[in-house]
Amino acid sequence: MAALPHQETRLATIAQLRQTLRAIEKPSLVGKDTPLLPFGIPELDEALAGGLPCDALHEIAALHEAALAPAAGFALALAARHAARKSVVFIAEDLSAAESGLPYGPGLDEVGLAPERFISVSAPKSRDVLWTMEEALRCSAVAAVIGELRAGARGIDTVATRRLSLAAAEHGTLALILRTDPGDEPSAAATRWMIGPAPTAFDPYGVGPPRIAAHLTRNRRGNLGSWILEWHRVEQRFILAEIGQPLAATAPDRPHHSARVASRVASRVA
């Protein structure tokens, strides 16, 4: 039976709406032509199919409350590498800034971000953080936007993250949500990271380079994985940390028999 005229009009309207929605959603999808930010680590770049998409939304969460500092350092390092000569906007709730503090000059220099290119914004509530992120993503002078959301923050849903993804894709801006706890809500983010601290390497002259444990738990472009990353101060990028477990040297005042036993144990472990 042929469709009635009003039914044909309705079907045509629905088809047109579907085409419009696909056109709107297309920029938010990570495609072949999207700009990438490679880590320079073959294992990690392979999992990301070449690198981190620069015109997309990514979530970075601290494994626990004490891990917020390495998580923030990871987010700032990514933003600094992508920013070049443009600005980085860091948005945090008033309460979060009062409890955890804000990035400071020497730390920004450490990741290669000049303090004069760092813009800090305070927002009263989490929904204001998300709104400010979306507005900042549309600014041509901004290369990356970081929004810090504390535990229990409201408004982080698929609709909010979808809006941020669309804004990031439309203007080619890197969007990073920094969370103080690992959330499990549905999200439109291209990747989701869980960041925690990792023991530094031994350095006879002081504290070794900072290390983090990076867990990629969501990835639209490839596989998941975990890596121990070390910050290279000279090259200002992450490298894959060399994990070793050296045996303790024999004490100089140890009896001959004890030294021989320790030597046997060391040879068996090796």
Image (cartoon, rainbow, N blue to C red):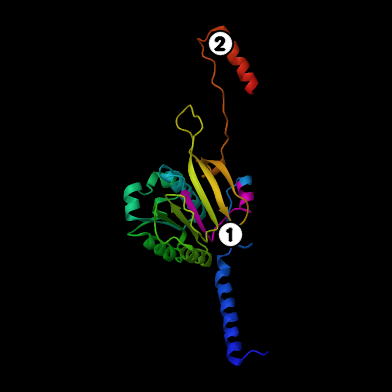
Residue projecting furthest to the right? 1
Q: Is residue 191 magenta?
A: no
Secondary element under disc 1, as helix, strand or loop, is loop
Residues under labels 2 and 1: Cα distance? 60 Å
Which mark's residue is nearer the viewer, 2 or 1? 2
**202, above or below 92, in the image:** above
Going from N to C along the chain, the mark reached first, 2 or 1, is 1
Q: Residue at x 54, y 21 (%)?
A: 248
Question: Which quarter of the image is occupied by the C terminus?
Answer: top right
Question: Which region is colored magenta?
Answer: 44-61
Q: Residue at x 40, y 65 (%)?
A: 131
**169, above or below 179, in the image:** below
Which amino acid, by three-letter code, is at mark 1?
A: Pro
Q: Is residue 55 magenta?
A: yes
Q: Is residue 26 left or right of residue 2?
A: left
Which amino acid, by three-letter code, is at mark 2?
A: Ser
Residue projecting furthest to the bottom? 5
Q: Is residue 122 left or right of residue 28?
A: left
What's the mark number on residue 188? none
Q: Residue at x 62, y 63 (%)?
A: 31
Q: Position of residue 51 (x, y in %)?
A: 59, 53
Residue that numbered label 2 is attached to = 258
Q: Quadrant of residue 1?
A: bottom right
**196, above or below 149, in the image:** above
Tags 2 and 1 touching, CB below 8 Å: no
Residue projecting furthest to the top? 256
Q: Position of residue 231 (x, y in %)?
A: 51, 41
What's the mark number on residue 35? 1
Q: Position of residue 220 (x, y in %)?
A: 59, 57
